[in-house]
Image (cartoon, rainbow, N blue to C red):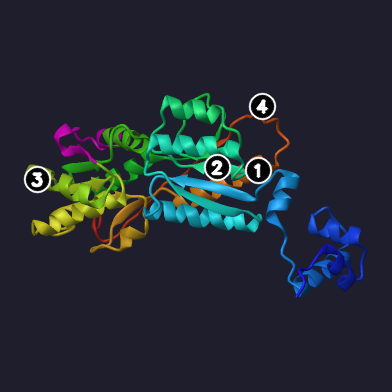
Amino acid sequence: MPKPTIISIAERAGVSIASVSRVLNGIGARPATVEKVERAAAELGYVPNAVARSLKDGRTRQLTFAMPDIGNPVYVAMVRAIQSVAKAAGYRLLLHSTDAVAEDELAVLRSLGDRTSDGLILCPIRITDAHVDALRSASGPVVVIGSLPGGVPVDSVRADSVEGVALAVRHLYETGRRRIAFVNGPADTVPGRKRGEGFRKAVADCGLAYEPELVVHTDFGIESGAAATEALLDLRPDAVFGANDQLALGAARALHARGLRIPEDVAVAGMDDSELAQAGWPPLTSVDLGSTERGRRAAEMLLHRLTSTESPENPVPHSTTARPRLVVRASTGRAAPDS
């Protein structure tokens, strides 16, 4: 069967070749003509040549999402949200897992110059001077999911980690906990630093003394959370707060190994409210930092940049913040009567 062309489509639809060309290129035509052309193209099995189209209009109709860990449920939630927005706008989504390696993130930023995609959503956990320089000189539109230093002309979507930590610590305090251990991520990461600042402020707001020995920095992972919690248990905390759900689940593992009951002996809470939060036993109290919402907003901001008439030479950066929400489950129990 011969490959369908705009000539054969025009003959099947009973319209001019020029009309077919306008419809297939999205230039515009009467609704009746559009319907005839689209029906004829479908009947003939016509598939647009994406390469030829990209050469013509300079667009690949592809977006890239670069994240630290493609296996982390937080980023999976973001992927789903970004994919939904991109697909609705006629874009394909390319995924890249950077393992939080700065050089890998910088390489993805530089690849915008190769025109493999029209724009990039980047989710770094560290922002170095090299990141700032690369963002300022990026060859295409970029949206960062995370916090940026001032003066970087790039759109961003942030989580309010400080308020999120406050919600969790306040809840633990209200359940009667007074020795709250904090298992945090690496101190040199943006989330580790922000959540550390939030914890110090939150315990002070509850009238508790900040006890440095109850704070541990480690990698963002279940095994790391278990090892860190094991080292803290001799200090007899009555609650363990993990800076993400993986750390909190690791804490729960360490508590179970010691024969301690959750929440009767030690309460446990996490952050992100990822799918993991309901996978453990008991189900995990966690702070929802709006992973899905951040992914959706980032995709919408990127598509806005791709269609904006604003000068790309001096863009005015836009930023938005997803509000946190505490989701209480069995791992922390109910509020104490005298709280």
The residues tagged by marks 4 and 3 sit, at their Cα atoms, a distance apart of 57 Å
**Residue type (three-letter) at the residue carrying disc 2:** Leu
* Residue to which mark 2 is pinned: 120
Does the rendering let one see residue 271?
Answer: yes
The residues tagged by marks 2 and 1 sit, at their Cα atoms, a distance apart of 13 Å
Task: Tell me the number on the disc at residue 313.
Answer: 4
Judge whether 244 appears above or below 199 on screen: below
Quick one: label 4, few (<14), some, or many (20+) residues within 10 Å?
few
Mark 3 and mark 2 lie on one chain; the one further toward the N terminus is 2
Magenta region, residue range: 201-218
Task: Inspect the magenta stretch and tell me whether residue 104 lies in it.
Answer: no
Residue 108 left/right relative to 180: right
Q: Secondary structure at mark 3?
A: loop
Q: Position of residue 337 (x, y in %)?
A: 22, 54
Nearest to viewer (mark 4 / mark 3): 4
**Residue appearing at x 41%, y 44% in the figure:** 98
Does the rendering let one see residue 336?
Answer: no
Q: Would you identify the image quadrant in which residue 330 lies?
A: bottom left
Task: Inspect the magenta stretch and tell me whether residue 207 lies in it.
Answer: yes
Task: Tell me the number on the disc at residue 304.
Answer: 1
* Residue to which mark 3 is pinned: 236
**Residue appearing at x 92%, y 66% in the figure:** 15
**Residue type (three-letter) at the residue carrying disc 3:** Arg
Nearest to viewer (mark 2 / mark 1): 2
Quick one: label 3, few (<14), some, or many (20+) residues within 10 Å?
few
